[in-house]
């Protein structure tokens, strides 16, 4: 089974030497991880009170392009499409990403506040525009705890998305419930379901748990207690993530749910890069 490996681009102030060193570090880390068929690079931005983004890292599309060249693994560039100033600007960005950066895989992401009117195209409109371009593979984000998520997933699938990457998963129940309902809705519509990538991440410290919660991720009390009490936090978190993925796969098999599910392992930070690689190896060994 092949999956995604998600890495954070360097800080925006990084010089060429620092960026090149980051590419080389990732290249060495993923060497031999044959099950990784995509390097997934998020767009890191913080939004102020007016909905204006602050980009704190180097351009993720350009970094994905460097990774693609350096590793031979296809890059995926995430893009928060509502932050773009107009639909025409989105089209120009897409053209540049494909023709100059040689990136043909994307994840389109919505703004952080669904009550706010952003200037750029919403995700479904970005999907519709991109679906007209041959040779491009694109997906969207799946938030299993969001109300009425199945309706959102169906609309995005109808607009052309071929895959979804989930929010970080630390308990399988919410993921399983939504996937089952989505599969049923696809069957009713005679529609082929998209592929789902379960996002998993290792933890190496208490700070990681705080960061997960800041991201809005649900970390159940039993999982948090297990990590806090463990003398080997990294290995414990890898075991937890692996078991979650296996439980989801078993659930789909037992229920006869015909949705392809793979994994998206997130390194979260450079400090956890090697731990994330160990998680990939653990997932490979368990399947």
Image (cartoon, rainbow, N blue to C red):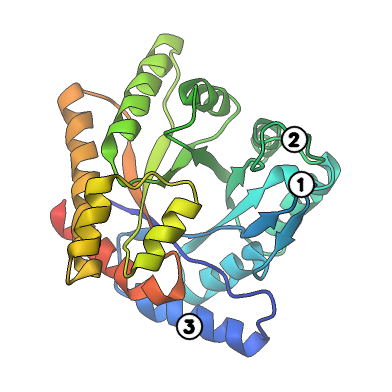
**Which image quadrant is residue 156 in?**
top right
User: Badge 1: few (under 14), some or many (20 or more) residues near its Cα, within 10 Å?
Assistant: some
For marks 3 and 2, the one nearer the N-term is 3
User: Badge 2: few (under 14), some or many (20 or more) residues near its Cα, within 10 Å?
Assistant: few
For marks 1 and 2, the one nearer the N-term is 1
Q: Residue at x 20, y 31 (%)?
A: 251
Q: Is residue 24 above or below residue 74?
A: below
Residue 247's disc number: none
Residue 24's disc number: 3
Which percent across, then down, holds residue 30?
Answer: 36, 72
Q: Nearer the viewer, mark 1 or mark 3?
A: 1
Residue at which label 1 appears: 51
Question: At numbered mark 2, what does the secondary structure look like: helix, strand or loop?
Answer: loop
Which percent across, then down, holds residue 220?
Answer: 29, 44
Question: At numbered mark 1, what does the secondary structure look like: helix, strand or loop?
Answer: loop
- Decide: marks 1, 3 in contact (CB < 8 A)? no
Residue at which label 2 appears: 116
Which percent across, then down, holds residue 41?
Answer: 54, 61
The alpha-carbon separation of the residues under discs 3 and 2 comes to: 40 Å
Question: Residue furthest toward the top?
Answer: 188
Question: At numbered mark 3, what does the secondary structure look like: helix, strand or loop?
Answer: helix
Which percent across, then down, holds residue 262?
Answer: 32, 45
For marks 1 and 3, the one nearer the N-term is 3
Q: Is residue 83 left or right of residue 238?
A: right
Q: Is residue 80 above or below residue 34?
A: above
- Decide: marks 1, 2 in contact (CB < 8 A)? yes
- Can I make out residue 136 in this image? no
The alpha-carbon separation of the residues under discs 1 and 2 comes to: 7 Å
Q: Is residue 105 left or right of residue 115?
A: left
Q: Is residue 186 above or below residue 142?
A: above
- Decide: marks 3, 2 in contact (CB < 8 A)? no
């Amino acid at each position: 089974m092949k999956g995604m490996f998600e890495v954070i681009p360097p800080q925006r102030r990084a010089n060429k030497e620092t960026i090149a060193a980051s590419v080389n570090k990732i290249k060495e880390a993923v060497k031999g991880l044959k099950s990784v068929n995509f390097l997934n690079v998020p767009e890191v931005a913080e939004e102020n009170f007016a909905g204006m983004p602050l980009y704190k890292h180097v351009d993720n599309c350009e970094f994905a392009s460097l990774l693609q060249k350096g590793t031979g693994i296809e890059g995926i560039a995430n893009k928060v499409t509502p932050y773009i100033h107009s639909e025409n600007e989105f089209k120009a960005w897409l053209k540049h990403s494909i023709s100059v950066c040689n990136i043909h895989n994307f994840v389109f992401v919505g703004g952080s506040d669904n009550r706010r009117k952003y200037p750029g195209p919403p995700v479904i409109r970005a999907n519709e525009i991109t679906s007209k371009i041959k040779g491009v593979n694109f997906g969207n984000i799946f938030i299993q705890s969001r109300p009425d998520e199945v309706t959102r997933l169906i609309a995005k699938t109808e607009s052309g998305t071929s895959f979804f990457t989930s929010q970080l998963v630390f308990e399988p129940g919410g993921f399983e419930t939504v996937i089952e309902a989505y599969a049923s809705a696809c069957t009713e519509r005679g529609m082929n379901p998209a592929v789902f990538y379960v996002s998993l991440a290792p933890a190496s410290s208490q700070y990681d748990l705080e960061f997960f919660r800041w991201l809005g991720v649900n970390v159940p009390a039993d999982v948090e207690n297990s990590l806090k009490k463990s003398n080997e936090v990294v290995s414990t978190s890898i075991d937890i993530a692996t078991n979650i993925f296996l439980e989801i796969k078993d659930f789909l098999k037992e229920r006869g749910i015909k949705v392809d599910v793979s994994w998206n392992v997130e390194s979260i930070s450079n400090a956890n890069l090697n731990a994330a690689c160990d998680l990939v190896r653990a997932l490979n060994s368990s399947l």
